[in-house]
Amino acid sequence: MQTITDRFHAQRLDAQDELASFRQRFVIADPEMIYLDGNSLGRLPQATPTALDELVETAWGERLIRGWNEGWLEAPVRVGGKITRLLGAQPDEVIMADSTSVNLFKLLVAALEARPDRHKIVTDDLNFPSDLYIMQGAARLLGREIELVVVPSPDGIYGPVAGLAEAIDGETAVLSLSHTVFKSGYTYDMAALTAVAHEAGALTLWDLSHSAGAVLLDLNGAQADLAVGCTYKYLNGGPGAPAFLYVRRDLQETLHNPISGWMGQRNAFDFGLTYEPAPGLHRFLTGTPSIVAITAVSAGVDLLLEAGMDRLRAKSIAQTDYLIGLWQAWLEPLGFRLNSPRESAWRGSHVSLGHDDGWRIAQALIQEAHVLPDFRRPDNIRLGIAPLYTSYTEIHDALARLRQVVTDRLYDRYPADTEGIVT
Amino acid sequence: MQTITDRFHAQRLDAQDELASFRQRFVIADPEMIYLDGNSLGRLPQATPTALDELVETAWGERLIRGWNEGWLEAPVRVGGKITRLLGAQPDEVIMADSTSVNLFKLLVAALEARPDRHKIVTDDLNFPSDLYIMQGAARLLGREIELVVVPSPDGIYGPVAGLAEAIDGETAVLSLSHTVFKSGYTYDMAALTAVAHEAGALTLWDLSHSAGAVLLDLNGAQADLAVGCTYKYLNGGPGAPAFLYVRRDLQETLHNPISGWMGQRNAFDFGLTYEPAPGLHRFLTGTPSIVAITAVSAGVDLLLEAGMDRLRAKSIAQTDYLIGLWQAWLEPLGFRLNSPRESAWRGSHVSLGHDDGWRIAQALIQEAHVLPDFRRPDNIRLGIAPLYTSYTEIHDALARLRQVVTDRLYDRYPADTEGIVT
């Protein structure tokens, strides 16, 4: 507990880090700024501008419409296939499409339709609000009464929610959760909850936005039914990058996409007047996908595949453990609470530190100390670790600066919370 | 009828064309190739790679998460506001979101919900198939019985569909049509049909994909209720570029977005657990928009605004009239049919020429004659005119080559139709 606060210790850990060189594969425009928000928007990979230039100037600019027959039509499957390797799924079980929220709508409605005699959606109040909004909208839309069971977390922002398993019953059509929750970083036991759901005859639908590229996932091993996720966080796909969706292979032909557009049509270029779903996962496509946006995702995902999820996860655990050690040494005495699990098995790749003056401290940290976290109400300073480019020395320095912001009361001149920062 | 076939005539028209210099604002990688498929995928504007580089390398690479508070959050409204100037709408009546098909789903369901005592959707079989598929999916989803009335076109591919107005009755919730139809380029009288729909108490929902940037639109003047459209055709936004949607101002607060995601939430960054729609058009957003993709659209739309829709439309009419003149002189005697309206008032910016060997001729035109049209079954060689970059000389040469493909029977060695080319 003594050496951990020593900056040489951090430098030694960086020197021993076999993934350290991946940092050079990203654009680091301002080396003085410590970026701990890769869990909201990943950094720009060096390879991405080149990939975009080639797509735009060569494929679009020169090949024009022919690009669709020279790889674009298969881009959602091709990049989805890469992502399966981060998720523990088969190559034909993930496809790129739309946004996370639109995909959640599709799969949620498909799941409700696959359980026509059941009327409950079970979730919890740790879920990302957009997921809850989508559920509320879908429940309102369908003809039959749908009950949205939002199991409350008695302790507010942590996890797990104790009553979840008990809320799943014979009337439950689908259990839908954020696998890693956005405030605390608590990560659910996917296999255990899926088993509970399956025991009750329900399907599971996981939002992997804060898990993909952050924790080891084994969708197939957990028998997960359905999942969605974004690519702009740990996958470094760029602001608002398109999302992915997963449907377990044996379910693909049995489910219906409620937003049945032409990219999900069997033989779309026959231009028939009646919708017939395409085989496999293609049926969950809707409109024409943005090839520019998917190209950026592809470049981002390549870096994770090269580094390997086992090594990335090991480094993420070591770094978040290290961060928690520094919190304990420096920040707990200053009134900071650990709002994330202490046990790495239940933790994603971000750590939330709570403080009564959290919002003001976060503002001062950004403005005075050149550290970029984000903030989630009521009190969470959320520190995201992206093992592809976050160094131990950055974590050391960020927490040292955070301590200084409080000890020197640099936050005094900042007003109280009025608005948040984007997830 | 004699001088029109003279190449000097075409060159003279180009010399007199006050929009001719806009061609230089596009990447023309292969000047020998005549591109007549800008109605499917517009050419790459010279400004787009620069705009993308700046967005990616500066905004994303340097500003990182701060980009959301430095313009990205407002990008869907900002670029939507530009597009309103092409549509005859108010600046707060158009927003960029999702794909055309997803937007159609949103507005169709919203319209059905706004007319709860009515059960019919009226459309025609000239509509783009994805629109019909979306209607079929939405009709299947809702609790009450929805009847999809697809009025048939007796003559197959032309327009207008005669029985449309008669099909709209007191049970009709919404009339939804492609304003300019994808095969023939026939353009409906939006004001007249909207009046019929309103007379019956129904709403109108227009797909403007083949109209935006191609014909003069006056959504406000026509009293149109709802519209969607794509940006990768005449707006030059790139392959699969995100779409737009229009909701007339007085309807915005009365309609519900069925895919209610966090970008449509009032005060999204409060992360409240209950969906409350944002004021105005924002409520029709769903997930996080792709900023990379929207940036490309913005660069494309700027060129149309600079040229001005009045001048673009005048040139489009002159060029399609010229093309039809050449057809009459050269191609009608060779068995080509004009599958588009002869009267420019009812014609978009593409002209379809039918031929019994259309598919084989289209293939030969591409492979042997370096002209890129597209093909739509059963017999349509679709020639798209993009007045920003299509020259009269190109039209002359393309039709001269088309004539030669037939007179020299260059298509003999091509097999019969097996598959189409992307729209």
Image: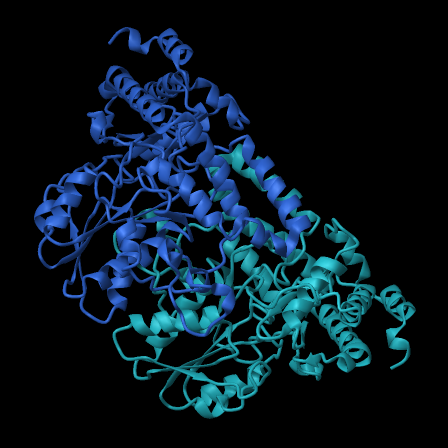
Chain colours: A cyan, B blue
Q: Position of residue B88 (x, y in %)?
A: 30, 37
| Residue B42 vertical placement versus B34 (above, below) | below
- In this image, A35 relative to B334: left or right? right
Q: Position of residue A200 (x, y in %)?
A: 42, 90
Q: Residue furthest bottom?
A: A166
| Residue B238 seen in render | no
Q: Position of residue B103 (x, y in %)?
A: 35, 54
- In this image, A259 relative to B339: left or right? right
Q: In the figure, residue A330 lies in which quadrant?
A: bottom right
| Residue B127 seen in render | yes
Q: In the figure, residue B316 lies in which quadrant?
A: top left
Residue at the (69%, 63%) spot, across then down: A413
- In this image, B3 relative to B421: left or right? left
| Residue B276 vertical placement versus A67 (above, below) | below
Residue at the (86%, 68%) spot, across then down: A10
- In this image, A360 relative to B222: left or right? right
Q: Position of residue B242 (x, y in %)?
A: 44, 48
